[in-house]
Image (cartoon, rainbow, N blue to C red):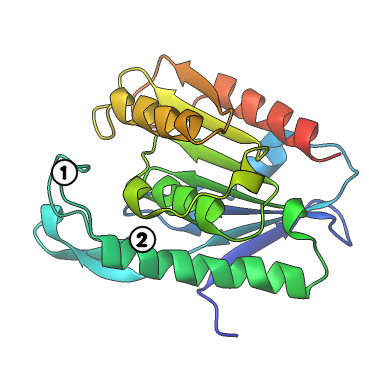
Amino acid sequence: MELLPAIEQETAPNPEYCVIWLHGLGADGNDFAPIVPVLKLPEKPAVRFVFPHAPQIPVTVNGGMVMPAWYDILEMEIDRKVDTEGLLASVALINKFVDREIERGLDEQKIIIAGFSQGGAVAYHLALDRPKMLGGLLAMSSYCATCSLIHTHASHTGLPIEIHHGLYDPVVPEHLGMEAKGFLEEHGYAPVYRTYPMEHNVCAEQIEDIAAWFRAIMT
């Protein structure tokens, strides 16, 4: 199968888990790749981290400039008008990475999807819509852009979900993170919602929480 270019890192040989981590608008897989050693995960279980690079597309709010993006941003108020077609195309591209990990011998519940901002919107749709439950969903500074299109599965409500958001985020306002939390709770999920005194970025306290979450679900 043809995959997007991606960075791969393994914490040790013969990984038992995989984390597929999606960057935000204008970045690429290098944005989060340096986080792996900072997480200070234990030697076992071994984890494969995959950081795909988004396709290069014109982005409307940036004057049509071509940049890495999982979908077009049509308006500054990002939740008002969504490039649904582009987002779902990216979901299909990332599902190929999930399928590749299954071909490599991993069970779906050993595969975790993480995403920041735009990447988180793709992660929401993929993790909630996929027929079989994955191992976890981490959404950082993001929003559920396609909630109305997601086919939620009653058997998925045990999915471990972490939602992280900056209290002062000027790009993806915190109320959008709360809306995603509300959607999940309405459908029987039990997400953990954490906020941090930051804007649209990642902070040290958050990285510690992510590491603790990985350790808790990778058993």
Left or right, residue 62 beside residue 90: left
Observer-nearest of 196 and 34: 196
Which element type, helix, strand or loop, lies under badge 1?
Answer: loop
**What is the three-letter code of the residue carrying label 1?**
Arg
Question: In which quadrant of the rendered image does the N terminus lie?
Answer: bottom right
The image shows residue 208 at horizontal and vertical percentages of 65, 24
| In the rendered image, the vertical position of residue 52 relative to residue 47, given as above or below | below
Q: Quadrant of residue 206?
A: top right
Q: Quadrant of residue 132?
A: bottom right
Quadrant location of the C terminus in the rendered image: top right
Q: Which mark, residue 70? A: 2
Q: Residues within 10 Å of mark 1 (few under 14, many from 20)?
A: few
Tell me which residue sits at (72%, 36%) in the image: 214
**Label 2 element class:** loop
* Callout 2–callout 1 Cβ contact below 8 Å: no
Q: Residues within 10 Å of mark 2 (few under 14, many from 20)?
A: many
Relative image position of residue 148 (x, y in whole percent): 33, 49
Q: For mark 1, what is the residue? A: 80
